[in-house]
Amino acid sequence: MGASGKARRWPALGVAMLVCLALIPMGQPAHADGTGPTFQNSGLSGGGFISVIAQSTSTGTLVAGGDTQGFFRSVNGGQTWTPQDAGLPATGYHVGALLNVGSIWYAAVGDGSNGGIAESLDDGVTWTESPSGKGAAPPVFDGTNLPGQTGNPRATGALLATDGSYLYAASFGRGLQRWALASASPEAGWQCAAVCTSFLNSVALDGKGDAFISVISRAGVSQGVDEVSGLGSKVRTKAITAKKGVSAGVQELLSLGSRVYAAGANGIGYWNGTAWLVLDSTQHWYTLTGYETVAGKTPVDVLYAATYAGHGTKDVEQLMVNGTNVVITGLVPPGSVGADVDGTSTPWWEASSAGTAGTLTGPEAMIGGCPSSTSGLCAGNTTDVFVGSSILLESRNGGAPDAMLVSGRSGIWNYAPGATPAWLPAVAGLDTTFDLDISVDPADGANVAASDADWNVIGSTDDMTDVDGAVVPPRFTTGSTGLAVTWDASVSPSALIASGGSRATNKLGSIWYDAAWSTGGAWTSLPLPTGVSLRPIALTAQATGPGTYVLLAAFQKKGVYAFTASGTTGTWALIPPPSGSAGPSISPNDVHGVSFAWASDGSAAFMYDEGTHAVWESLFAGGVFAPWVKVYADTSTSPGRGFVAADPNTPTVVWIANTNGLGYIDTAACITTCPAPTWVTTSPGGPLATYSSVSGDYVYMASGGTTPSFWEVQVTQCAVSCPTATGFNDPYLDEVAGNAISLAAGMDGYVYLATLGNGIAVGTAP
């Protein structure tokens, strides 16, 4: 390969395998429904940010929307949830608002630049997105709530409202828009009603033809509250913001009778038509709901608000407003928060020491942003990057505290005022968010580890049925998160290796080693290569003998370094680029753009580099890595992310998945150049894994997009015939695998799919 060619062991076997694989039919791949693996949610349930929650007035169905997880549905009061994301584009996974109108659900979805209105005509089971665009297309929203995103760090909640004739939307950059409910589809026909270039984060209709909107800058700076009158005739807009007080920094507006209530950075208050009056100025509130019990000049209203600033009794509070008097009751007193998942006797994994939130769970840890730089949740950061939350009232007692569901940073919590404890996590079936990498212990298939954007590193000793509460993740440098995981199987039991770095920029790299991870052992930080502080975005390790191993780490935009070690002691060496030519760029634009694989006999390392859209190989012999050699380059017009897997049977064969499909190259056939891949399916490619059993060796692929599927290729027992690639559809996979990022398979027959936005799916090998 390359100008001088190369030598590999067992070239005859490699050529034989090439001939055998060539027998695979190149026609339409077989496709089977319901005969492949059955996937389900892993034990990593309930994490991630649930921005909004609402209930159907006709059926009682609950729908929740996440910042990256899309939609969840519950028909039993929130005790169990099912994902409902089948066929949604990526923008549909960022949910900013929910509204039920009769038999139809509407949702505001998007990432600040793309998205629109999602609609469900079957009570939240299926959703169709009408994308935003120019002209009379749906508005734009920002439901991401993610650090590093452009736009406002909080644009979720009361973004949709209706007066029975129009659907109103508080858009992100297009002002207050409306659409006639009698129209055929929300895909077109939208009109701007007011402030047509403004960014809004809340809208409330007063039932008299007026609207109240909270205006912000794109960066989230409050620009006050406007009253929009004459919606049925000549529209007029008037700023009603006081120089100081509750009308500045508003996060949520609520219209009840003759009053418009506001909650935000400066407390809770209301507009009485002429002035703003303050009810509670002691907290920074993020969500507000309630109802009126007595109308008239001296109304009696019941309000509920949630904050992050208290971390105690007043994290969620009830405000009984009688005229101008208010009685405030904090609803999270000591001892009111339980750890068992609602409806079960099973302790929630997040209530253990697992995860960076650790024991800081409950409403005090899941409503919003960072209360102070000393908070364990914030690690020195006071920016409100996670600040959307939602309260759904399930009962209206008119005085005594009502039953409710509160969503936020850590899923959904059920509040039952007559129960002990009153607060329980209602998280069964809720996916986590960004699970960036997943890996199975090669010596024990029951041991599984994943890197997670929220929790750094998650471990399991029972096939991801439960998250191991003894695992205390390494606390990466402030601002960093887990990126990759792998195993040192040269010791028994295997040691877990994890890397971290900044999610926003290419810095703060670190790699950690733990030989006693499952029993709460301490992590040891590995020294990085001299002069390297960039983030290690991919890891893979290979045992080279008893107690010795080689760890490969891809440092973004820098290179791949090999750590030859015993335990935590070793030396680093850069795998050099080809002589006289450029080598892999190490994914300069994508933190998830490197995929690694070792040849089955350890004689080479393969890598797919998203930066060069190429597969590279480095031979490994005598403890030394040869320079990288390009095996394949994707020359498509719009090449995307790619993945590699080493053939489990033949060391010279590398499997490749990208936008062209799934194929393979036998590098033993490379002379001056390598042959083009032999594609066994043209279904868009996704992450790969291999599996070996007594029935044969297999390559698996998880194909994402709007129609996810799971593919299998058997690569042994080819003496008589070689089966074609077989694709399987699975209902659970169809809901969650739109953005598949990492696939792993264990020797015990389980496969694990990590996704960017929908947690981890666990299945069994076909």
Image: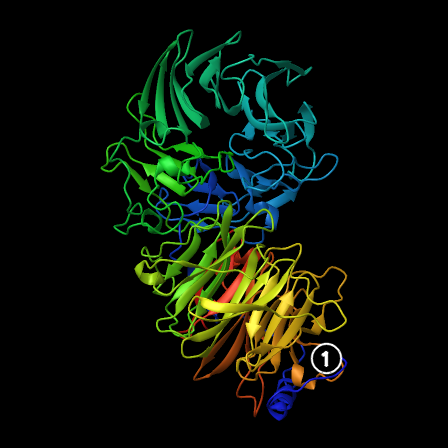
Residue 654 higher or lower than 367, as above or below: below
Measuring from the top left, give residue 734's x and y in whole percent.
52, 58
Q: Within 10 angstroms of label 1, few (less than 14), some, or many (20 or more) residues?
A: some
Measuring from the top left, give residue 670's x and y in whole percent.
71, 83
Instruction: Identify the residue at image location x=55%, y=12%.
Output: 242
Residue 38 higher or lower than 332, as above or below: below
Q: Which amino acid type is shown beneath numbered disc 1?
A: Cys
Closest to the observer, 630 or 56: 630
> Looking at the image, can residue 701 be seen?
yes
Measuring from the top left, give residue 96's x and y in whole percent.
54, 37
Residue 391 higher or lower than 680, as above or below: above
Instruction: Identify the residue at image location x=63%, y=86%.
Output: 8
Instruction: Identify the residue at image location x=35%, y=44%.
Output: 426
Q: Is residue 666 left or right of residue 714?
A: right
Closest to the observer, 704 or 523: 523
Q: Is residue 502 left or right of residue 632?
A: left
Tally the numbered discs: 1
User: In what quadrant of the picture does the N terminus appear?
Assistant: bottom right
The residue that label 1 is drawn on is 674
* Among the 4 quarters of the image, the one containing residue 238: top right
Q: Helix, strand, or loop for circle 1?
A: loop
> Looking at the image, can residue 257 be seen?
no
Instruction: Identify the residue at image location x=72%, y=79%.
Output: 674
Measuring from the top left, give residue 202's x and y in whole percent.
55, 27
* Among the 4 quarters of the image, the one containing residue 169: top right
Please name the colour scheme applied to the rendered image. rainbow
